[in-house]
Amino acid sequence: MDAFARGLIFDLDDTLYLERDFVFSGFAAVGAWWQRRTGRGDFAARCTQLYQAGARGNIFNHALAEVDGDVDPALVEQLVSVYRDHQPSISLAPDVARFLRGRRSDDFLGIITDGPAPTQRAKISALGLEQKVDLVLCTDAWGIGYRKPHPRAFETTETTSRLMASQLIYVADNAIKDFVTPRARGWKTVQILRPERVHACDPPTPMHQAQSQIFTFDDLEQAIRDIS
């Protein structure tokens, strides 16, 4: 393996692209499935309206109650499967695309992401990231107990990259789970605060807080310099 000067490790959802774009892509796929099944084309719009009104859990249950007056748990499971298994129509955030085009040649790039592994891999493929990064770790491939803040993904990154903790930077969005473990291991941490992000949350303790915050990857290099 080549020698790397540093490792930039990224979360996926609401870090490298907008998670809401996957949500709307999934609603469209579910709506198409629903139309084939029922002949009605209103389901995706209802899901989108619920989401934009602030609903985050059980959207399919609520939409089914509106269109059918009944909620069949087996049908909900089918809708969830269609949503999770669809081929997403998503794109890198423009600032991320700029950053990756100008990346340093001695950067080790990686992704650590939670969520159903096939779904996360489909997102990574749709974003064209397989050719742009050196390591992808979907924690659910080990089991949901290994989701962040479990240390296994961070340990694996250290081993694979052959970099010291002080050379590693984790860039992510969720202060509840993303930063406490890499900080404890000696990594640098940067939080990206996209205005359109799905999960806006406060860190529960000082150690859960990233060492720097940015609103765009255009400011990432300066943030890293400021905490180095």
Image (cartoon, rainbow, N blue to C red):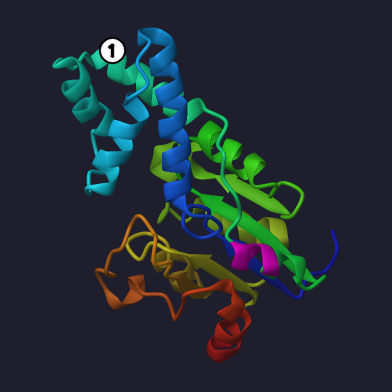
Relative side of 209 to 26, left or right? left
Query: What residue do we see at 58% from left, 82% from top?
Result: 224
Residue 43 visible at all: yes
Q: With 3 as the anchor, is 191 left or right in this view?
A: left
Quarter of the figure with the C terminus = bottom right
Q: Position of residue 205 (x, y in %)?
A: 26, 73
Name the residue: 65% across, 57% down.
110
Quarter of the rendering containing residue 68: top left
Residue 143's x, y, as percent? 45, 36
How packed mark 1 is, by other alpha carbons closer than 10 Å (few <14, some 14-19, many 20 or more), is few
The residue positioned farthest toward the left in the image shown:
69
Total numbered labels? 1
Say above or below: 140 vs 77: below
Q: Quadrant of residue 38?
A: top left
Along the viewing direction, whichever of 45 and 86 lies nearer the viewer: 45
Question: Which kind of residue does numbered mark 1 sit on?
Answer: Ala
Q: Position of residue 4 (x, y in %)?
A: 78, 70
Whether residue 165 appears in this view of the structure is no
Is 131 situated left or right of 190 in this image?
A: right
Q: Quadrant of the N terminus?
A: bottom right
- Name the one closer to the observer, 57 or 48: 48
Q: Is residue 211 magenta?
A: no
> Which stretch appears magenta?
94-98
User: How far across and down, in percent of the image, does residue 155 sit?
Assistant: 56, 57
Please tell me which residue is depicted at 63% across the width and 62% down the height of the picture: 158
Helix, strand or loop status at disc 1: helix
Residue topped by disc 1: 74
